[in-house]
Amino acid sequence: MATYNNQLQAQQKPKFSVAITTKGYQSLIANTLRDPARVRRFTASITSAVAVNPALQECDAGTILAGALLGESLNLSPSPQLGQYYLVPFKNRKANKIDAQFVLGYKGYIQLALRSGQYADLDVTEIKQGEYLGKDSMTGKPKFQFIEDDDQRDALPTVGYMAYFEYMNGFRKVLYWSKEKMMNHADTYSKAFSRQKYEELLAGKIPESEMWKYSSFWYKSFDDMAKKTMLRQLISRWGVMSIEMTKALESDNAVAAVADNGEILTTQEVMSDAQEQPELHTGKPEVDAGQALPHGDISQGEPTAVEEVVDLSSL
């Protein structure tokens, strides 16, 4: 099926701020969103977001627009501060261009789950030293004793991560992973992450000249990636999945395109850790389409540092 992305590949692509004002793109946005007020708001927000991110400006305009429309269809906020989704530039070696990859943030998972009306509560947090008390001898469920003083708690090292939900009917599920388990998970299933290199990075052993190699969100914001992994593991295995959430999970870490009929198509160019199910895989995947660029603002299919990523929201 022909897409606007494919049509653009045959010609010199203008800057996104110019491309989005063309008749074809404006017609596409209008046909997809329908409401004129929504069209104006969407156009303004995505243009502004791309303008402040030099790396994103290098991306294929069609993938930027399609990714943003995907986010809009999920009704997530475009605010970078909310962190509900990201458009992440990565080099697509197969097509010899830079695409914008749609990446759902952990706050986006929470928003979509609560919106389904099935959850009375849902959260994910770091567990600090001394808070994990082991498993209940009868049920095997993890036990915690949280430190009440926030300043004291923040000063302690993180030893693990806990995610939980409670249904409207009172059913609860809690999942706990130690930081050691999370570290091994990332090392095994993330193509852009190396535990050894991460430990060297924390120890200050990486030369400044090589820092561009560590643009993966696992290096820049390990805790946020860990939270996303916990929520995905918890909800996909035990949670109620609405149609909207299923669409979001299937689209996470994908490159989007808009078909001629207005349908948003997604291609899993790069498979990131959050999508991997440990019991289904036996080794570290090979690096494929995503390739970090020397200037350090293009990732291997995973978000770069928070301040470097455009949160076009619905993202």
Image (tube, rainbow, N blue to C red):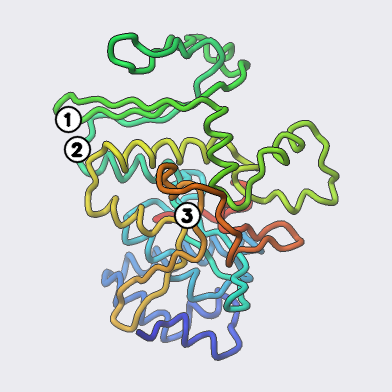
> What is the secondary structure assignment of the residue under circle 3?
strand
Which residue corresponds to the image point at 49% horizontal and 47% vertical from the top-left? 282
Name which of mark 3 and mark 1 comes first in the sequence. 3
Q: Position of residue 308 (x, y in %)?
A: 63, 52
- How would you rate the neighbour count of disc 1 (Cα within 10 Å): few for under 14, some for 14-19, many for 20 or more? few
Circle 1 sits in a helix, a strand or a loop, which is it? loop
Q: Pointers 3 and 1 in contact (CB under 8 A)?
A: no
In the image, taking residue 154 as reference, residue 162 lies left or right, namely left
Q: Which of the 4 quarters of the picture holds residue 287?
A: bottom right
- Using the image, determine if residue 267 lies above or below residue 307: below
In space, the residues marked 3 and 2 are separated at their CA atoms by 24 Å
Question: Is disc 2 placed on a helix, strand or loop?
Answer: loop
Image: 49 above or below 262: above
Q: Quadrant of the C terminus?
A: bottom left
Which residue is outermost to the bottom? 10
Residue beneath the point at 66% across and 44% down: 194
In the rendered structure, which amino acid carries the disc numbered 1? Met
Does label 3 or label 2 sit earlier along the sequence? 3
Quarter of the image for residue 279 reads top left
Q: Which residue is mark 1?
A: 168
Q: CA distance from mark 3 to mark 1?
A: 28 Å
Vertical position of residue 10 compared to residue 65: above or below: below
Instruction: Locate residue 292 relative to residue 267 in the image: left or right.
Output: right
Res. 103 mark: 3
What percent of the width, then of the height, locates residue 306? 59, 46
Q: Position of residue 239 (x, y in %)?
A: 26, 38
In the picture provided, is 130 more to the left or to the right than 29? right
Q: Which residue is mark 2?
A: 118
Whether label 1 touches label 2, CB < 8 Å: yes
